[in-house]
Image (cartoon, coloured by chain):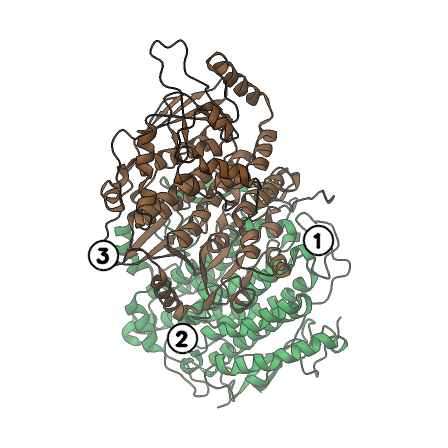
Amino acid sequence: MIDFATEPSKYHHWTLDVDGEIATLTMSVDPAAGLRDDYELKTNSYDLGVDIELHDVVQRLRFEHPSVKVAVLTGGLDKIFCAGANIQMLAGATHEHKVNFCKFTNETRNSIEDATSNSQQIWLAAVNGTAAGGGYELALACDEILLIDDRSSAVSLPEIPLLAVLPGTGGLTRLVEKRHVRRDLADAFATRSEGVRGQTALDWNLVDYIAPASIFGELITSRTTARAHTSDRPDVETNTPGVALTPLERTSSGQHIGYSNVTVEIDRGLGTATISIAAPRHVQPGDGASLAAAGDQSWLLRTARELDDAILHLRFNETSIGTWVFTTTGDTNAVAQAEAVMNADPDHWLVREVHLFWTRVLKRLDVSARTLITAVEPGSCFCGILAELLLVADRSFMLEGTWEDDDDPPPAATIQLTAANRMFPMSNGLTRLETRFWQRPDALKAALDASGIALDAAASMAVELVTFTPDDLDWHDELRLTYEERNSFSPDALTAMEANYRFVGPETMETKIFSRLSAWQNWIFQRPNAVGPQGALQRFGTGSRPSFDNRRV
Amino acid sequence: MTVVDINAKIPNNVGLADDRRLQRALEGWQPKFIRWWEDMGPSAFQRNPVFLRTAISVGQEGWANFDHVEMPDYRWGIFLADQEPNRKIAFGDHKGEDAWQEVPGEYRSDLRRLIVVQGDTEPASVEQQRHLSLTAPSLYDMRNLFQVNVEEGRHLWAMVYLLHRYFGREGRDDADEMLMRHSGDEDNPRILGAFNEETPDWLSFFMFTYFTDRDGKYQLASLRESAFDPLSRTCDFMLKEEAYHMFVGATGVGRVVQRTLDLMREHDTDDVQPLGGLNLGLLQKYINFHYSVSLDLFGSETSTNAANYFGAGIKGRFQEERRNDDHQLKTVYRNVPHFDENGVGLREVTQLAALNETLRDDYAEDCQKGLDRWNRATADAGVDVTFTLPHAGFHRQVGTFRDAYISPTGQSISKSEWSGNVGRWLPTDADRAYVKSLMVGVTKLGEMAGWVAPPSRGIHQKPVEYDYVQL
């Protein structure tokens, strides 16, 4: 089982040094500490395990180090910054692992950009040796790239000439969309296995600054100082304590995973995982200071962490469970009370972090290759932040009325939109409501106007927040038939259909990475030219050249 | 036989006069090279006539033409061995196909990289040795140093020719950069780490030419097998020059051994240090050092790059065509050293994966021959000392033994055992300081420093007592 829980004392591959407002993250991958034992992580190449640690440290820097304004990413090996994803690892990985791996690494690189843009924790890449493939893509996720000019260190994207695959973590997209590298130069760059060095790299805008070794340290200092100046994070002098992310408590058996606020029940026959989220049971902090005082135990932060962990666990370890069903339990008002801090104290550093974290968790759901269904039953609390789950879903069901056979039936379920439903942009830059009602301003207005009102099934249907509203008589059959039907379809066709529907509206760099780049890459990952016995990925390093089917498709 | 145009601005046998574009490009590079030579080449005696060998033809004898010449006026040129008609590729996936007369597009960057890495070592060694002439033990030795230097310079020309002729604009940029990187320069170091260390003294120089230049020999020999015919022919001719460099090393170390044995006999002592000599134990330490760092230059025991190069036909094995196998190596196996928690062992891999190790084996066997000669000298002198090559795992920074502590005899030992004994196995600071203290330039005709015996004969039928460098 792949476990995403780690912490700095357990890192194999990274060292974090925090010095006041500057953090330096040094990559020194332990060749012997790969997740599988059929490859060695030579020359700072990475596998999922390396990236899990990176993901952890990006997250911790934001929460545990409020006064770190600039994070410097650098290499700890001689003449090597990072060689990218390990090729033997990719060659020996299943298709779904490759795709999952790329998705997770993409999300982590996006989170680095999110930290720079939205948390004002600015990431700089100090490329002190060769950055190849995923190594350069890692640098591309940083806001500035500083390259050592020693006549040998190059930046490169050698995937196409060497491996017959694409740079899979946003490289092609970021070159033209973020760095505005001219497409013909980008073409020349991505087909040149040895890459580009020094002045040429600067001229082509592949990097932002170059300096020879003797003054490379000064360049780093001058850039970190300059960028730290522009950040609005709490100054070191304020002695703002961070929020320690303590290990999540998680119990798991074959079918059941339990956290404090989140539980997952797996039905292997139906191919479903029911993810249930419980509302807070106690009054939650109302401002930033008390939120900080609650550490990582506030409902908002804890639930986000648990949901995030559950998503990653299901994605990687339960690939045959194709349908995720969301339910909630508890008091609607308690959810509203807990999330109110996001509007009450939005400028507090921790409130901002929690808000951004939820944004990322919900985005993870959007790009999960699973059927997402939300089931609204009596006793649920789909309010505000949890109502986003209705909008995330491919379909949603809401029980009309209540359980008829119950001697003491609970009140019928209601749904409540709040200000929170305007706060979580998707990767297309729109909120989920705006996306749902794309180019239908009247429908959008009707839903927004219903904000703050407890909507029963009929009202929810009227403002188009749910798909179907079966009553007690049909409820269980309707859901069972839906799950069975879903389980009988081709998972590939479902994933493709769902992904096409989920992201209406404008394209952004993020949507292009998750749609255009990933889709082409995943196509290539199935093609014999890459993965066949004579394909480049299989042949790489064997001394045999790949043999290509030259027909263009 | 190809015609050598020796009177051209750039002597060559590649028909440069018929390729105006290439000629212009190389003539543009030539002054940069001369400037580099004057700035970064030998730090003294640049304007003293030196009795140098200059290639004027690639035939059996014609290329060895001797005359006194000032080094900046040396006729650096471009010489390829004669073309073998209808040469076929001898190994890899293209085995049996015609050798390439032009670079195939798909191998362009790999070939360029190999040529740049090889080319970068040539001027690097000149830079590493640039101050040695000041402490030369004799005019004969100073001349040998300069001969090695100018020929390393010519090897750079050989690689630059390939870059200019076959690799377009990028190749020309690479050629310029070879003159901009400098050994030991913090901002612009040479590509391979070993070539950024200064050669501090003449004992190190002899050891370097014996052990490290021999690595060069094996690299060139495997590039001579290349499917890319111009590279093959270039390396073929370079090997003839390289042989002399190893002769300088082998005879140099041999003369030091001889001098030590003479001192031991004359003074009836094992410790010749008070007499200004170099003890046999100290020589063994230098052997241990230079042999082990040279082993690192061959790379890891298993290498995907080497396998790729072999499969592609870019780089073969030493004497590929004399080997009796399928020349593809995918289904034949061999053992390579392997170090793990169980200690020093072996593991079986395909020969294709183990090409670095195979080349290292050939090299080690070749190194042993010099030791055999030196051991004959000790035996003849009745001294019970045998020089040995240390175990392949001793003092290694590259490959499976990288993090291991291995004694010269191949035992896996603890870190503290290593620290306690390293001074017996490798030159200490005191050893190096002592060697350095002996380094005093001897420039009087026919005289020799006290730590090294005179050679048995001079150069090109000249006596040992000859003004090899005219002061």
Chain identifier of the residue bearing label 2 in the image:
B
Nearer to the camera, B296 or A139: A139
Q: Are marks 2 and 3 in contact (CB under 8 Å)?
A: no
Chain identifier of the residue bearing label 3 in the image:
A
x and y percentages locating residue B155 in the rendered image: 59, 71
Q: On the rendered image, what quadrant is the N terminus of chain B found in?
A: bottom right
* Picture residue at 36% right of the left edge, 39% below the top: B342
Residue B73: which quarter of the image? bottom right
Q: Which residue is mark 3?
A: A238
Whether residue A92 is visible: no
| Three-letter code for the amino acid on which mark 2 is drawn | Val
| Three-letter code for the amino acid on which mark 3 is drawn | Thr
Q: Which residue is mark 1?
A: B89
Disc 2 or disc 1, which is closer to the eye? Answer: 1
Colour given to chain B in the rendered image: green
Q: For mark 3, does the 10 Å Cα neighbourhood hold few (<14), some (14 to 19), or many (20 or more) residues?
A: few
In the drawing, does residue A176 fall left or right of residue B447?
A: right
Q: Which chain is brown?
A: A
Whether residue A157 is visible: yes
x and y percentages locating residue A42 in the rendered image: 46, 48
Disc 2 or disc 3, which is closer to the eye? Answer: 3
If you read the primary sequence from the N terminus, does the residue marked by circle 2 or circle 1 appear first?
1
Q: For mark 2, does the 10 Å Cα neighbourhood hold few (<14), some (14 to 19), or many (20 or more) residues?
A: many
Chain identifier of the residue bearing label 1 in the image:
B
Residue at mark 3 to residue at mark 1: CA–CA distance: 71 Å
Residue at mark 2 to residue at mark 1: CA–CA distance: 46 Å
Nearer to the camera, B128 or A4: A4
Disc 3 is placed on an element classified as helix
Q: Which residue is mark 2?
A: B452
